[in-house]
Amino acid sequence: MQTATILVTGGAGYIGSHTCIELLHAGFKVLVVDNLDNSSEESLKRVEQITGKTVDFIKGDVRDAQLMASIFADNKIAATIHFAGLKAVGESCAMPLEYYDNNVNSTLVLCQAMEKANSKNLVFSSSATVYGDPEVLPLTEDMPLSATNPYGRSKLIIEEMLRDLPESDKLKKSDNPWSVALLRYFNPVGAHESGKIGEDPSDTPNNLMPFITQTAVGRRAELSIFGSDYDTVDGTGVRDYIHVVDLARGHVKAVQKLLSKDGIDGVQAYNLGTGNGISVLEMVKAFSAENDVAVPYKLVERRPGDVAACYADATRARVELDWVAEMSLEDMVRDSWKWQSLNPDGYTV
Ligand code: NAD
Ligand code: UFG
């Protein structure tokens, strides 16, 4: 099983590149397809340096049906991890059609190619955003789902589309049914401990951690903390930050489950988070203390669309995938800073 080939769409990106490392460490072969719209091939070269193993790479778009058909015709793919997509909430409000095209259409084309090739094991990158504005915390997978922006709606639409597949298997009496893990990530941060790969946003970062690291390295004057009057421990927003290496290992566990004798019966959703809520101020303080570096900040108005708090109950992933997040807040802030300080301009080489 361990020499099986895993197709990784969007594998040159932030979470994808870290997942490639963990797949290679676990003994899998990795084939990446990525259009490099939001990444650099350099990340995959560094994955090869870190692991001493080869990553097969095809530069292309997952929406290209001919390309995807040829990939499945030319390779025996044991399972596919689908990271490729657009992910900026604000941008999705300005250009919803691009988001539906890239996210929904890529999944549609991918699944059609998978079905044709009878290669029906899929791990899909979903998001905690599918819980909308949560009323009860921590979040379990069976809580109500909703979307507050086109990005989130694209993830919800894809989840629903994938949930239709097992029924089609029953009607067709398929002897190789779909097996799909929907991984709902909370807030990925951190980087590989080598400092060689990490998050490299091409524009001004929307997310907290890259904004903190770019401020600490001097690329930004100060961090704006959005909202200090939430009903939280110190008034700032609370999130479930998860180290990207823990997240990457969650993907390996999901692939191993898909390929195991028990498999996953149809479609199952899993929260990947630590279960701990951390406030923005707690994060900034932890970052400064661990790395002995100042992060100038100011408290400003709330950011529209933000929720006060969001954190996971990840019990299902522990019980069914044998996965728990193991890395600490100190690991997250140390590794984020190591990547940024060793690569102040990201992958520019
Ligand atoms: P990323 O932008 O770093 O990686 C996505 C990769 O997909 C990039 O390398 C990009 O070039 C590629 N890509 C985009 N559209 C493509 C297409 N049509 N064909 C081929 N390649 C394409 O983002 P990431 O943070 O690694 O996120 C990966 C996935 O996880 C995304 O689906 C995202 O929505 C989801 N997710 C991310 C977060 C987060 O905070 N980072 C949270 C929840 C879910
Ligand atoms: N924040 C700031 N200043 C910044 C950036 C963020 O104070 O410059 C705060 C936010 O207000 C929030 C917290 O930091 O309280 C985290 O914000 P992020 O933008 O890093 O993350 P979000 O939780 O808002 O969004 C993330 C992903 C989305 C996904 C969502 C739910 O970026 O793609 O989680 O899963 F939809």
Image (spheres, rainbow, N blue to C red):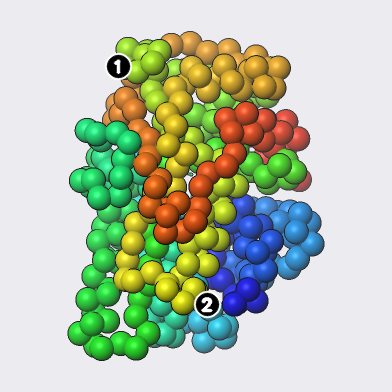
Q: Nearer the viewer, residue 333 or 276?
A: 276
Which residue ends up furthest to the front in the rendered image? 319
Q: Amino acid at mark 1?
A: Asp
Q: Quadrant of residue 179?
A: bottom left
Kindly state the secondary structure of the residue where label 1 is placed.
Answer: loop
Residue wearing tag 2: 78
Q: Nearer the viewer, residue 189 or 12?
A: 189
Kindly state the secondary structure of the residue where label 2 is placed.
Answer: strand
Q: Nearer the viewer, residue 216 or 259?
A: 259
| Location of the N terminus (image quadrant) | bottom right
Q: Earlier in the sequence, mark 1 or mark 2?
A: 2
Q: Amino acid at mark 2?
A: Ala
**Labels in figure, total:** 2
Residue 136 vertical placement versus 87 (above, below): above
Q: Position of residue 95 (x, y in %)?
A: 33, 46
Q: Position of residue 52 (x, y in %)?
A: 79, 62
Question: What residue is drawn where x is 51% and y is 47%?
Answer: 324
Tell me, for residue 231, which label it has, or none. 1
| Location of the C terminus (image quadrant) | top right
Question: What residue is drawn where x is 57% and y is 25%?
Answer: 212
Q: In the shown orientation, is residue 172 left or right of residue 202?
A: left
Question: What residue is drawn where x is 67% and y is 35%?
Answer: 335
Q: Quadrant of residue 307?
A: top left
Question: What residue is drawn where x is 39% and y is 47%?
Answer: 315
